[in-house]
Image (cartoon, rainbow, N blue to C red):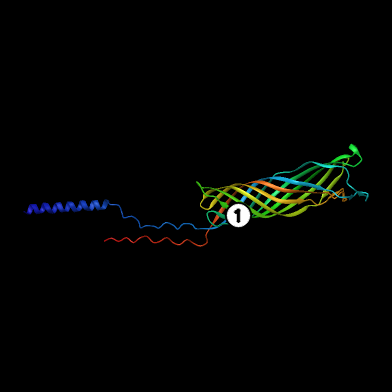
Amino acid sequence: MGRSLALLLAAAVVAGASASAQAADLLPPPPPFEPPPPPIEFSGWYLRGDVGVGALQLSNWNTALRPGIDAFGNVVVPGGPIWNTHRSIGDTAFAGGGVGYQFNNWVRFDLTGEYRIQSNYRATNHFTFAGCGSACYGFDQYNANLGTALFLANGYVDIGTWYGVTPFVGAGVGAAFHNLAGFTDIGHGIANGGYGMAADTQVTNFAWAVMGGFAFAVTPNLRLEIGYRYLDMGRITSNPIACNGVPCFGERQSFNIASNDIRLGFRYILPSLIPAPPPPPPPLIRKY
């Protein structure tokens, strides 16, 4: 009996030791639950920047002459036919920025300003003096530079988003501030050696635009855009051309100016200044 009791006690000791060893091998309890950080709230306000190139178009070109005074003080009346054989304006590049607000997933609005670098304006007029025939044939070549500052209020409709790409259409209205500078008139033929120039012209015109393109979501608050814009910038009329320092025929040239623009840009959506509410506390877990 004593021997059996001793064996039972020994078995109990071995079992206790084994249980202690197994308990020592168990993993420590998991760390307490850490709530995720609150999501970033965006305000709807955004900043934008754009660069691009524009193919300028001239239309409704016209030249106007009136009686002038020659170098000897005589009144000179323009006579004979005058015909234009060339008129053009070079392409331009532009850069700008603005601020806007995204009302919802469909509608947004922004105010933008941009500077369009100077483009070279050129024209050629041919003429003959009345009753003089081919001996009185000549032509004038005109050159000037056109620079523009543009300010627009724009509205857009985002059509929908597929795989992070959002097509959009929009329209804008505003003002174009033109500077037609360095206007010169160089004579050839019977007018060889003649030189004219006009004072710089500053013109403010109503401007309007229609546009479309695609926006690409790079991050939750950054969009890259590529788009096309048709831009009408109104009519420009030069100051009178003075020939060799005298009023000459007081010629003025005028034209409508428009542009087909390709734009690359970005929109950075600003975070909200009001912090997001904290997440709800985790559920209480009890052990019974």
Question: Where residue 56 sits: x, y (%)?
Answer: 70, 45
* Foreground pick, 276 / 8: 276
* Foreground pick, 86 / 96: 86
* Above or below 120: residue 38: below
The residue at the point 57 percent across, 49 percent down is 168
Q: Is residue 142 left or right of residue 111?
A: right
Question: Where residue 183 sits: x, y (%)?
Answer: 79, 48
Q: Is residue 12 left or right of residue 30?
A: left
The residue at the point 82 percent across, 45 percent down is 185
Residue bearing mark 1: 155
Q: From this viewpoint, which residue is outermost toward the top?
A: 134
Q: Is residue 70 left or right of residue 152?
A: right
Secondary structure state at the residue bearing disc 1 = strand
Q: From this viewpoint, which residue is outermost toward the left?
A: 1
The residue at the point 24 percent across, 51 percent down is 22
* Foreground pick, 151 / 158: 158
Location of residue 288 (image quadrant): bottom left
- Which three-letter amino acid code belongs to the residue tagged 1? Gly
Question: Where residue 62 sits: x, y (%)?
Answer: 79, 47
- Total count of labels: 1
* Above or below 82: residue 222: below
* Foreground pick, 14 / 159: 159
* Above or below 76: residue 36: below
Label 1 crowd (10 A; few <14 / some 14-19 / many >=20): some
Question: Where residue 88 sits: x, y (%)?
Answer: 75, 43
